[in-house]
Amino acid sequence: MEDDDTSHSSNQFKVDGDHNTVIQQFLPNNISRKREQLFWYDIRSFPDSLLVEILARLPLKSIFRFKRVCKHWHTLISHPSFCRFYFSILNSNAASFRILYSIEEHEGQRPYQFKVLAMSNGLILCCLWSSSPFVYYVCDPVTRQWIVLPTSTSQSQLFFGEGLITRVNQDHILTDYTVVRVNFPESQSNHLNLEMFSSETGKWVSYKLNCPTPIKLRKIHGGAPIHCYGAFHWLTHNHGIVAFDPYKDSKSVRLIPLPHDRDLESEHNHDGLYRLFDEWHGTLRYFEVADDPTKLYFLIMWSMKDYEKGEWCCEFKVRRSDLHCRDLELSNWLLKGKFLPILFHPLNLNVVYLRCIEVGCIVSYDVVNRRLDVVCKLNGGLEDGEVFSWRVVIPFLIPRWPQPLPTTPRSVTPPPPPPLRPW
């Protein structure tokens, strides 16, 4: 079939009967100007409303890649209204998370050690140890952005209990973040000394807070404060909680008791290894795992009933005989195995993660059906002798919309932070 200017086709088709295939061959040299225009379209005349509908339904990685197509697309995708529309059509089940733990010794920085301290809205706070003073980083693992915080003017170097909180506006845009750390007292004191850093001011501010009774905080690995009800919460040596609300009362702290019927013997003997204290969707929760198979109850959980009065409510008590599992190897250890709590599921109210020491795996416990399921094996994933518990892990919610990291007034260029390992 020969092509000419009066033909209604710009292509030549050749049929191979043996393979039943059709080969399409373009003839650009014989295409007239009129016919060539049929294949050309000015993307600038494409309606923005329809373009937004299409782009917002693409994978997130593709959306940000298309910001480079032209200035108009970059402006369209970068506008806050696009982010709002993206969240409005996003599937609520699309959220995911990872469990991170830090590499204690960075290969590129031999004498240095990095520690993951806290996470909030996709940002991670980590610290460079073996340096004086400590160097703090705020990192975004998704965009691979990082900022080093300026050093404090405080003379004391005995800080711990670092925490991170962030704020987002109605357009889901990260506006600022705050870092807090506590001065470690040598003995019990009627004062709590802490420092707070704000990304808005780029400065550290010191606080000396009055305590109603003498307290001493627990200096343990994984002792980051729990941010809930607008306040920071640290565990104390006298089996309680000290709370500080910088917006409600910036001059003093309040003490909150822990559940009175918890296992005090296990808490003392194992330094809190078998308990889990955290926040879940605006509520404080306390979870306990029995350290001895002979104890009556295996799992117990409390939630804060009245925050102002410091009253707790027991959600459930579970015996080992009530549990069941589909995994044959794990089933053999339900009545005699040792389990360490790791974390609450950040998205599912009814799921708690634990580690089975004998099997060497991470399991999920479903509160509703009282079932344990194997999530993953830890073979080869951890160094020998490392205690994988709530003290060394941090849940990282993958942001649904990556955004620029809020900058501070001061800019410093330190060595980059180390990689993080998910399990």
Image: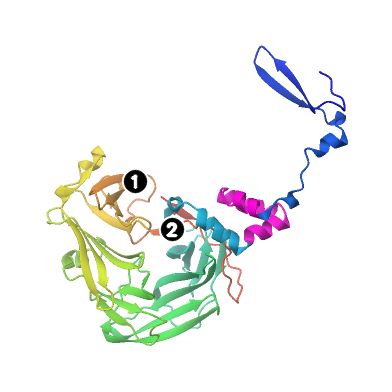
Residue occupied by mark 1 = 375
Question: Which residues are the magenta region?
Answer: 49-78
Front in this rendered view, residue 398 or 119: 398
> Which x, y percent locates residue 314?
20, 64
- In the picture, the disc for residue 396 is 2
Magenta region, main secondary structure: helix
Question: Can residue 142 be seen here?
Answer: no
> Residue 261 falls in which quadrant of the image?
bottom left
Circle 2 crowding by C-alpha within 10 Å: few under 14, some 14–19, many from 20: many
Q: Quadrant of the N terminus?
A: top right
Q: What's the residue at 87%, 30% (across, down)? A: 29
Q: What's the residue at 73%, 25% (across, down)? A: 24
Front in this rendered view, residue 260 or 330: 260
Kindly state the secondary structure of the residue where label 1 is placed: strand
- In the displayed structure, 245 sits above or below 314; it is below
| Disc 1 to disc 2: CB gap under 8 Å | no
Q: Amino acid at mark 1?
A: Val
> Which x, y percent locates residue 12?
78, 23
71 in the magenta segment = yes
> Which x, y percent locates residue 242?
30, 78
Q: Amino acid at mark 2?
A: Phe
> Which x, y percent locates residue 404?
58, 64
Q: Is residue 95 left or right of residue 222?
A: right
Question: Can residue 156 be seen here?
Answer: yes
Front in this rendered view, residue 13 or 125: 13
- In the displayed structure, 407 sits above or below 145; it is below
> Residue 317 falls in which quadrant of the image?
bottom left
Circle 1 crowding by C-alpha within 10 Å: few under 14, some 14–19, many from 20: few
